[in-house]
Amino acid sequence: MAAISQKLVVIVIIAIIAAGVIGWALGALTRPAPPPTPEKIKMAFIFPGSITDTAWNEAGYRAMEAFRGKHPEVEVAWVQGVYDPAAIEPTIRSYCEQGYNLIVGVGFQYGEPMAKLSEEYPNVYFLAIAGAPQYVGPRVSVADVRTDQSGFIVSYLAVKMSKSKHVAFVAGMAVAELSRSEIGQRKGIEYAGYDPDAALHVHYVGDFHDVPGAKMATTALIEEHGVDVVKAMGDGVQLGAISAAKEKGVYAMMSGTYHPEIYPEGMLMYEVWHWEIVFEEWYNDYVTGKLEKEGGKVYWLSLENGGLEIILGGGLVPPELQKEIQTLIEKIKAGEIDTGFKP
């Protein structure tokens, strides 16, 4: 009798377990599947020079940090000093292989290799800063800055502040935003009532990182032509040109960033580039699917969208001239002044 009771208990237990398993299985079949885990967005930034150059690379780095602070959901990686053409494509490819969705090359030299690699990596979107528009494609965008606008202001202020009426533009190479600045500077000098062929002395060093060469060229312009206002642009070139201006005691103007501590007694103007404006717009176009639907495009920093900011040196520019400069800025924004370039 006891044996029969034990068998009955075992049968009941097995039946209960079986019913539980069947119930779990049925529940699993009818239970809605959990939502898929969203793919982590990974964004890489490649800089051709040093992020402490006070100019091009530092402006890009500061913008990257501003973007990262606003978007903690994005995994950000970056590398500096990728200037050698032989290193550019392998660096971009490495980030593609690591699963980065968005890759930014902060320099005109990244446009061509990005266009090439976009054919190999259909899930990666590229942005070349100061990239040539011919590289725009289904997954490649480029961005640039309206230095014709800031250049106009630069030269108008420079020639007005100059006693000798000889001003200089010392830059890395005659490409992209640098040559565009020269166009705007010539227009600004004309607007001020002077001949740009006589007043503007331009020297392209030929290498963005040649600090000694930029310093030597700037010194020569000051000594040979009586230049007393120097506009500098381009990575280490800016450091060299400003160093010469300081030694010679003439005015200077910066491009890219705001560093009032570098030459407070002689810095007339800071031309600040806020690339985070472009990074934000490009990122939004990616997450909303606009890039996938419409393909790449050209993005601009300008006075109108706040990506291009003019800051005058503290106490160096007379109040009346400050008012003139502000009026010119507003006229440029309103389209009332021709700065020599149209996107």
Image: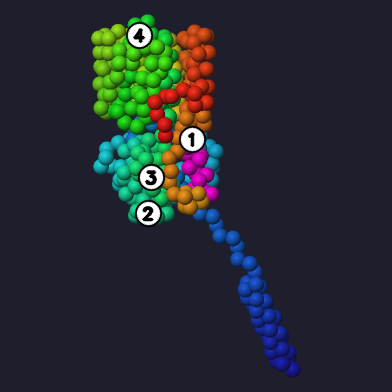
Q: Please tell me which of labels 3 and 1 falls first in the chain.
A: 3
Q: Please tell me which of labels 3 and 2 falls first in the chain.
A: 2
Q: Residue at x 42, y 24 (%)?
A: 339
* Left or right of residue 33, residue 263 in this image: left
Does residue 39 appear in the picture of this structure? yes
- SS for dot 4: loop
Q: Marks 1 and 2, how far apart in space?
A: 25 Å
Q: Quadrant of the N terminus?
A: bottom right
**Residue situated furthest bottom in the rendering:** 1
Identify the residue under disc 2.
121
Q: Nearer the viewer, residue 340 or 138?
A: 340
Residue 74 versus residue 59 in the image, above or below: below
Q: For residue 189, which numbered disc appears in the image? A: none
Q: Residues within 10 Å of mark 2 (few under 14, many from 20)?
A: some
Callouts 1 and 2 close, C-beta under 8 Å: no
Q: Marks 3 and 2, how far apart in space?
A: 15 Å
Identify the residue under disc 3.
136
Identify the residue under disc 4.
165
Check disc 3 and give the amino acid type. Val
Q: Magenta residues?
A: 274-288
Front position among marks 2 and 4: 4
Q: Position of residue 148 (x, y in %)?
A: 40, 26
Check disc 4 and give the amino acid type. Lys
